[in-house]
Image (cartoon, rainbow, N blue to C red):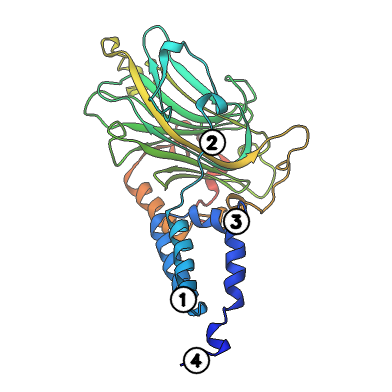
Amino acid sequence: MTKTSDQCAVHPLFYLFIYILLQENSNLIRSFTSQAPIVKFSITFSFLFLLEKMASSIAHFLVLSAIIVVLFSSTQAEVQGSFDDNFSKSCPETHFKTSEDGQIWYLSLDKKAGCGFMTKQKYRFGWFSMKLKLVGGDSAGVVTAYYMCTEDGAGPTRDELDFEFLGNRTGEPYLIQTNVYKNGTGNREMRHVLWFDPTEDFHTYSILWNTHQIVFFVDRVPIRVYKNANYTNNFFPNEKPMYLFSSIWNADDWATRGGLEKTNWKNQPFVSSYKDFSVDGCQWKDPYPSCVSTTTKNWWDQYDSWHLSSDQKLDYAWVQRNLVIYDYCQDAERFPKKPEECWLNPWE
């Protein structure tokens, strides 16, 4: 039977969809790959069903399927180049090592020195992610920090977003502390226990930062939401660009049971491992960077990133019920008058 021209025709939306997908840094691709796996599966299935209806031949359908598979398997683009291309380190050479392929970085702490690194580039807003495997065994007194800061050092007017992993005695829960600084003022600590052993394998720790909220993620699960207000305030850092840092250091004056558990130097060196650093953010370029004022051209600065998704809200509720062990907003002894940001609704 001879096919008619209608049977061979391709729906115009097919070409539009292909064009959108192939645009460099397409917002659709960025938004799609930022979703959790279950959400990506749902989107994939829906797209596939719709596009199968659009495609008029098996060949067209296979092309579409291949594109969807590529999208589904995509992950956040990693920063390209070697460690030295992207970071500068601040420690003796003996305290920093890499795997043979250069993809895993090891920072060590002993009684003589710790180790740290920072990005050569600073950013204002975006998605920032790193995989870490923390010090195993008896790590009391040892802190591994992964954080963003406006300057190299604890300056009196710095802005800062912190992940701090607090060492422990063998067999005790590993604690994760987060904190936020604005113009040198912090005291906004939260502490969580983790639902896994972070010393056995790599896990992903990420920060989403835009003008509406800061969200701390562990393996894509939001553990803390820090909202902004719709007026100028003294608690939300959104004006200064930040570098990314990580370090391992001795903090046995406070880190484990308030300083009661001291570092056991018989176990040195203490080693933290890193890999797969990735950034999708606004690079700061003087004197007038593109991110001086916020736009909505990037997925991390669009409406869907101003709030938790439905699935994220379920995860966040579970974290709130089961993993929070300290929240400064609930500490009436330290804060008889609750800080104003504590009244903002993280669910909205």
Nearest the viewer among 324 and 173 is: 173
Camera sees residue 331: yes
- Which residue sits furthest right? 287
Q: CA distance from mark 1 to mark 3?
A: 23 Å
Task: Kindly identify which numbered label has been placed on residue 52.
Answer: 1
CA gap between label 3 and label 4 equals: 41 Å
Which residue is under mark 3? 27
Dot 1 amino acid type = Glu
As drawn, which residue projects farthest toward the bottom? 1
Residue marked by disc 4:
2
Residue at image coords 35%, 51%:
318
Is the C-beta separation of discs 1 and 4 under 8 Å?
Answer: no
Q: Three-letter amino acid code at disc 3?
A: Asn
Q: Earlier in the sequence, mark 4 or mark 2?
A: 4
Q: CA distance from mark 4 to mark 2?
A: 52 Å
Q: Which mark is residue 80?
A: 2
Q: Is residue 67 left or right of residue 252?
A: right
Which of pointers 3 and 4 lies earlier in the amino acid sequence?
4
Answer with the quarter of the image where residue 170 lies: top left
Mark 2 closeness class: few <14, some 14–19, many ≥20 residues within 10 Å:
few
Residue 18 higher or lower than 162, as above or below: below
Q: Nearer the viewer, mark 4 or mark 2?
A: 4
Position of residue 21 relative to residue 223, above or below, is below
State which quarter of the image contains the N terminus.
bottom left
- In the rendered image, residue 235, in percent from the top left (x then y), is placed at 61, 37
From this view, report whether residue 270 is shown above or below residue 276: above
Mark 1 and mark 2: Cα distance apart in space: 36 Å
Question: Which kind of residue does numbered mark 4 sit on?
Answer: Thr
Quarter of the image for residue 26 reads: bottom right
